[in-house]
Image (cartoon, grey):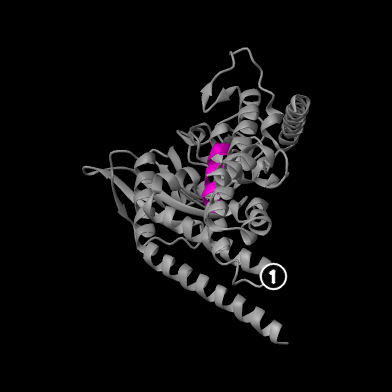
Amino acid sequence: MNTIVERLKNGIITENPIFVSVLGMCPALAVTTSVVNGLGMGMATTVVLIASNLAISLLRNIIPSKVRIPAFIVVIASFVTIIDMLLQAYSPSLYAALGIFIPLIVVNCIVLGRAEAYAYQSGVLSSIFDGLGMGLGFTFALGLVGAVRELFGVGSLLGFQIMPSFYEPVAILVLAPGAFFVMGFLFAIYNYLIKRAKSEKGDQA
Amino acid sequence: MRDIIKNAMVLFVIALISSVLLAFSYSITKEPIAKQQLIRQNEALSAVLPDSEFTQITDADFSKQPAILSLFEAKSGSDIVGYAFKVASEEGYSGHLELVVGISPEGNLTGIDLVEQSETPGLGAKADDEEFKGQYVQKPASALAVVKSAPANESEIGAISGATITSRAVTNAVNEAISYYNENLAEGVK
């Protein structure tokens, strides 16, 4: 139970894949033009993370260290492709919503990163929750970036107009440079808050 | 040497099992996927020409407009209410695009609907949003041009901000449908 909570907290806060480890930046910058897109990408990635961590953890004693990277890549790419086909065949509405994100997951560093840094050396249960924790952390980060970019760059959240009509949207925020601006600010705020929380804990110790 | 062989064998087995699983998934999902694509196509046809019955025209010659995949005649009762073209483009930002274009017998576009696309969410994928698609409704059936500013006249389509390539790919495909219509189906041509 402890490991489960620890893995979840690690993935969401302590080692948040975006704000702390700076992994998976490609989809994070490209896809966070709205809350819906950010959350969608995050959720699809979470499913792949859990499945791939599970598979790699199960195979960790069989895969020799020297060929582990190609082995990981074959496993991950196969999973993503199978999930893509199953969604397309059996869940048209979900596929219409998430389908475009799925091929993008293959190039997401987080999946390969967690396989290498954790699942290859850890048991099945903790690997599953590591995948879930990292996935949730990724989804949270993407949702947040998407929210900022959508709110100030378009004026809406989840498609609903929030900003008053006289608000002139800062359109650059939904384009590539805007992604960098928003990320930069959020990185600074996030790490400042973590640092402050740590030093407060240190004072109380 | 033994190490190299062992490593190669493990990789081989992993690749083999993955391939088997992939081939298996492909074979069991092939039919359901084809069914879903047909449903999607019919939805798109109804979106551009509602309340009609579609019959495919099978003896059409698309050699001058290779983007056209298929042509349907839309009828309501015994009246022809329009023609629906299924067109494809490989010029999308991420490659393959498929869309349906409806043209009325009076020579106006009734609309477009995207059937297949893998464009970037938030950018090219907005080609499937009403804001972009709606521009084509009621446009006269003559060649359309994509402009980056607001469209100034009836033959201009405003590009999606940051997704000019997608906008152009869609419009070029639509233009091929328009070209075929003007050469073969417009009033006074037959």
Percent position of residue A141, x then y: 63, 36
- The residue at the far bottom in this view is B1
Dominant secondary-structure state across the stretch colored magenta? helix
Percent position of residue B68, x then y: 47, 56
Relative side of A133 to A193, left or right: left
Q: Secondary structure at mark 1?
A: helix
Q: Which residue appears at 48% of the width and 41% of the height?
A: B141
Percent position of residue A78, x then y: 54, 64
- The image quadrant that residue A203 belongs to is top right
Please report, as a chain letter, where disc 1 is located: A
Residue A46 seen by the camera: yes
Q: Which residue is mark 1?
A: A65
B107 in relation to A99, above or below: above
Percent position of residue B30, x then y: 39, 64
Q: Nearer the viewer, residue A65 or A5?
A: A5
Quadrant where the N terminus of chain B sits is bottom right
Q: Nearer the viewer, residue B7 or B85?
A: B7
What is the magenta range?
A: A37-49
B19 in relation to B144, above or below: below
- The residue at the far left in this view is B77
Q: Nearer the viewer, residue A160 or B167?
A: A160
Kind of residue at badge 1: Ser
A112 in relation to B42, above or below: below
Q: Which residue appears at 62% of the width and 71% of the height?
A: A63
Magenta region includes residue A44? yes
